[in-house]
Amino acid sequence: MTPGEFRKLALSLPDTEERAHQNHPDFRVAGKIFATLGYPKADWAMVKLYPAQQQAVVAADPKTFAPVKGAWGKKGCTNVLLASANKKKVREALSAAWRNVSVHEALRSIEKTELAKKRRRRPTNAV
């Protein structure tokens, strides 16, 4: 898989936009990054998975997928070696990462709305 193919797959997901972060392209939904290109090197990418999802993709294809080093990797960020990547597996990983971020942001939005409603309903103490 080439970086261009990864980019095309990422951008095919609904409401995805490409921006840049730390001098490499990233892909976002609801303003939040779910994948990047060129990290840690030009021939790599990264997808934001949950730790259980990361374990599954790494176990299924350890030549292509590997945890990012450090704390981000422990949280599920997963590197993708593009040269050995299978398009179907990468599409599945990108879709999972996209869902993880979009669902998380939707839930946060609902929580903020509910909190705002509670604040408006709070009675004021008249003096």
Image (spheres, grey):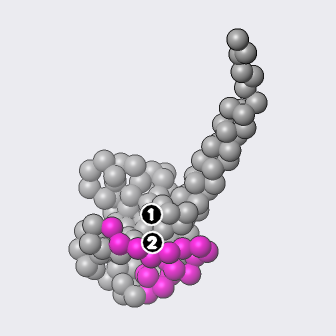
Residue 7 seen in render: yes
Tell me which residue sits at (75%, 22%) in the image.
123
Q: CA distance from mark 1 to mark 2?
A: 6 Å
Specify which label sits upstream in the sequence, 1 or 2.
2
Quadrant in which residue 126 is drawn = top right
- Residue 44, given in percent of the width and then of the height, sits at 30, 75
As drawn, 126 above or below 101: above
The amino acid type of the residue labelled 1 equals Ile
Taking the image as shown, residue 78 lies to the left or right of residue 41, namely right
Q: Are marks 1 and 2 in contact (CB under 8 Å)?
A: yes
Q: Secondary structure at mark 1?
A: strand
View extreme (left): residue: 41
Q: Which residue is mark 2?
A: 27
- Residue 84, given in percent of the width and then of the height, sits at 35, 80
As drawn, 74 above or below 59: above
User: Which class describes the residues within 10 Å of circle 1: few (<14), some (14-19), or many (20+)?
Assistant: many
| Magenta extent | 5-21
* Quadrant where the image shows the N terminus: bottom left
Q: Which residue is mark 1?
A: 33
Give the number of callouts: 2
Residue 56 seen in render: no
Tell me which residue sits at (48%, 68%) in the image.
28
The amino acid type of the residue labelled 2 equals Phe
View extreme (top): residue: 127
- Residue 83, given in percent of the width and then of the height, sits at 32, 83
Q: Nearer the viewer, residue 98 or 59?
A: 98
- Residue 110, given in percent of the width and then of the height, sits at 67, 47
User: Which class describes the residues within 10 Å of circle 2: few (<14), some (14-19), or many (20+)?
Assistant: many
Tell me which residue sits at (35%, 48%) in the image.
74
Q: Identify the mark at residue 5; answer none if there is no mark.
A: none
Quadrant in which residue 37 is drawn = bottom left
Tell me which residue sits at (66%, 37%) in the image.
115
